[in-house]
Amino acid sequence: MFSNEPLGHYSFIAFASELEATCYHEASHAVVDYMFGRPLSSVGVAASYEVDDGGELTVAYHGEVKTRGPDKIRVDFDYRGIHLMLGTVAAVGPAGERRYRHEVGIPQRLLGASEGDHRSIDAIAKMLERRGRCRFAYRRMVWKYAQMIVADPEVWSAISAVADDLYSEAAFDLDRDEPGDAWIYLAPSDVYRACRRNGLRRGMLRAA
């Protein structure tokens, strides 16, 4: 889950850049889920419109990627298996968004944006710590792994393709003039096609 603080009064270009950053965030999650072999259920981005204290309409962009199957894990699973996979999938959203923001030269608005991803990683890290593992080492490992993944040219090309598809839908369908949430979704099959076009295979990543 991704969320951004309300943008308030910004230019059209600023709005478009923030929406596209959200698309890159969710696209990164979706592509790496595919690479780990996790079947996707939905990939979506949304605009949440609220009226501020001054009576002006503000917007915040966010999104989510859902996979099929149970999300809860047991702490006695292999440390370098499912825990590494789930931590990396959480970290890769902020990592992909950070790369996009750096490349297009827009501010790194990531503290609030990645709060949910940080919570997911910290929850696993604390479980591992209770079993004698080092939570700080785990955090460093998943963030490093996520950055290595988004640095790969083929992976980044697939992420960009999915983000572009999301943005193309969102740019026209998320515009509102009253409070409320507006969502758009990309079909999982569209994500799979973008991955295959860029040489990625389902389950090609193994957390061992």
Image (spheres, rainbow, N blue to C red):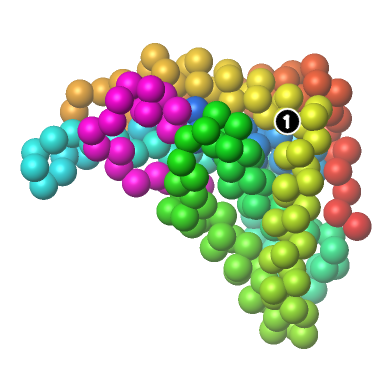
Amino acid type assigned to the residue bearing label 1 in the image = Trp
The residue shown at (58%, 37%) is: 102
The residue shown at (60%, 69%) is: 123
Count of marks placed on residues: 1
The residue shown at (64%, 76%) is: 126
Q: In the rendered image, which residue does mark 1 sit on?
A: 156
Quadrant of res 34: top right
Q: Could you tell whether 25 is left or right of 197 in the image?
A: left
Residue 98 coordinates in the image, percent (x, y) = 58, 42
Highlighted magenta segment, given as a residue range? 1-19
129 to 71, vertically: above or below: below
Q: Nearer the viewer, residue 104 or 1?
A: 104
Circle 1 crowding by C-alpha within 10 Å: few under 14, some 14–19, many from 20 = many
User: Visible in this render: residue 142?
Assistant: yes
User: Visible in this render: residue 44?
Assistant: no
Quadrant of res 104: top right
